[in-house]
Image: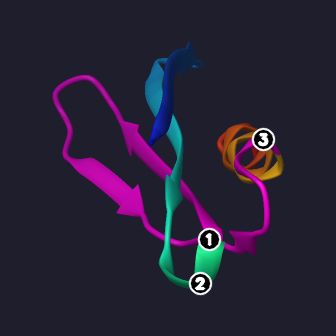
Amino acid sequence: METVVSTSHQGYRRIASACPARCGLHTADLATEQPEGPLKAFIALDYFFDRAPAWTYATRSGRI
C-alpha cells in the first residue's frame, strides 16, 4: 500500500509518498511541481524498514 500526501509550499505543489519496495523496505519518494512548470520526481530518496519514517523523510525533504 502506498501512502501519498499532496501539499503546497511557496507556490510549489509537493507530493510525498512512501511505497513498498523489495525485501520489505519502503522508499521515500517526492515529486514537486511549479504552476505552469514540469513535474520533477525524486524516486527512492532513501529506504526505510517502516512506512511512517519513509513518508516523514519524503515530506521533510520537500521543505528544503
Is residue 39 on the magenta stretch? yes
Q: Which sits in the foreground, 23 or 34?
A: 23
Residue underneath mark 2: 23
Q: Report how far apart the C-alphas of labels 2 and 3 lie in the structure.
A: 17 Å
Q: Disc 2 vs disc 3: which is toward the camera?
A: 2
Give the residue pinned by disc 1.
Answer: 45
Q: Position of residue 29 (x, y in %)?
A: 52, 56
User: Quadrant of the image for the N terminus?
Assistant: top left
Please tell me which residue is depicted at 83% across the width and 49% down the height of the picture.
53
Q: Position of residue 22 (x, y in %)?
A: 50, 82
**Residue 45 included in the magenta stretch of the image:** yes
Residue type (three-letter) at the residue carrying disc 1: Leu
Mark 3 belongs to which amino acid? Ala
Give how far across and how far down residue 24 sits, in percent. Answer: 62, 73
Crowding around mark 2 (Cα neighbors within 10 Å: few <14, some 14 to 19, many 20+) is few
The amino acid beneath tag 2 is Cys
Categorize mark 3 by other alpha carbons within 10 Å: few (<14), some (14-19), many (20+).
Answer: some
Residue placed farthest to the bottom in the image?
A: 23
Give the residue at mark 3.
52
Q: Residue at x 70, y 74 (%)?
A: 47
Pointer 2 or 1: first along the chain = 2
